[in-house]
Image (spheres, rainbow, N blue to C red):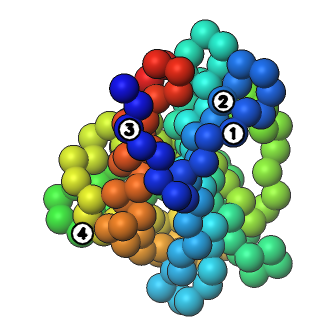
């Protein structure tokens, strides 16, 4: 059985046979800049296409380094690298946005603990976004949810 959906996790159909589960959070980095963090699982008719984290900074203020990996840190010994990856329906993203493949990270994350996302920026030090436990809990629940019996 599918777990009950959270209020901020949405299921929508981009096209027939292609459901997507999505969680969207408004977060701030250590420099008090606003970011949108969108975690989503996209399905194809034959199964899961992938799980991605799209980070969107304020246009004109943030220029993300598009080819560099995102570092995800728990503040203890756990640290992951998530490589940039556009999903097939997304040909390109604006300079204030990047998307990362986080399927392995979400599978390895065992509890809802705060995370620090180090987003590589062009010509600047990385932006550090703190993800609070409530957002991590929602992400973990989204990662475990299924659509139509498909994981």
Mark 1 to mark 2 CA distance (whole Å): 6 Å
- Closer-to-camera residue (45/63): 45
Q: Nearer the viewer, mark 1 or mark 4?
A: 1
- The circle on residue 75 is 4
Check the image and name the residue furthest to the left: 77
Q: Report x, y in % for residue 130.
A: 42, 74
Kindly check if marks 1 and 4 are in contact, taking CB atoms under 8 A apart as contact: no
Q: Which residue is mark 2?
A: 19
Q: Which residue is mark 1?
A: 12
Q: Is residue 8 left or right of residue 138?
A: right
Q: Which residue is mark 3?
A: 3
Kindly check if marks 3 and 4 are in contact, taking CB atoms under 8 A apart as contact: no
Mark 3 to mark 1 CA distance (whole Å): 16 Å
Q: Report x, y in % for residue 48.
A: 54, 22
For label 3, the crowd category at 10 Å Cα-Cα, with few meaning under 14, some 14 to 19 and many 20 or more, is few
Kindly check if marks 1 and 2 are in contact, taking CB atoms under 8 A apart as contact: yes
Kindly check if marks 4 and 2 are in contact, taking CB atoms under 8 A apart as contact: no
């Amino acid at each position: 059985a599918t777990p009950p959906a959270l209020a901020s996790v949405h299921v929508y159909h981009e096209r027939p046979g292609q459901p997507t589960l999505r969680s969207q959070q408004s977060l701030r980095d250590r420099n008090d800049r606003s970011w949108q963090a969108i975690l989503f699982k996209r399905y194809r008719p034959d199964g899961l296409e992938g799980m991605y984290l799209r980070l969107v900074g304020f246009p004109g203020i943030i220029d993300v380094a598009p080819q560099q990996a995102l570092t995800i840190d728990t503040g203890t010994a756990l640290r992951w690298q998530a490589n940039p990856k556009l999903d097939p329906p997304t040909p390109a993203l604006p300079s204030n946005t990047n998307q990362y493949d986080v399927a392995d990270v979400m599978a390895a994350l065992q509890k809802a603990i705060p995370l620090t996302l180090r987003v590589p920026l062009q010509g600047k030090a990385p932006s550090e976004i703190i993800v609070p436990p409530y957002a991590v809990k929602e992400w973990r629940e989204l990662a475990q949810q299924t659509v139509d019996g498909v994981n």
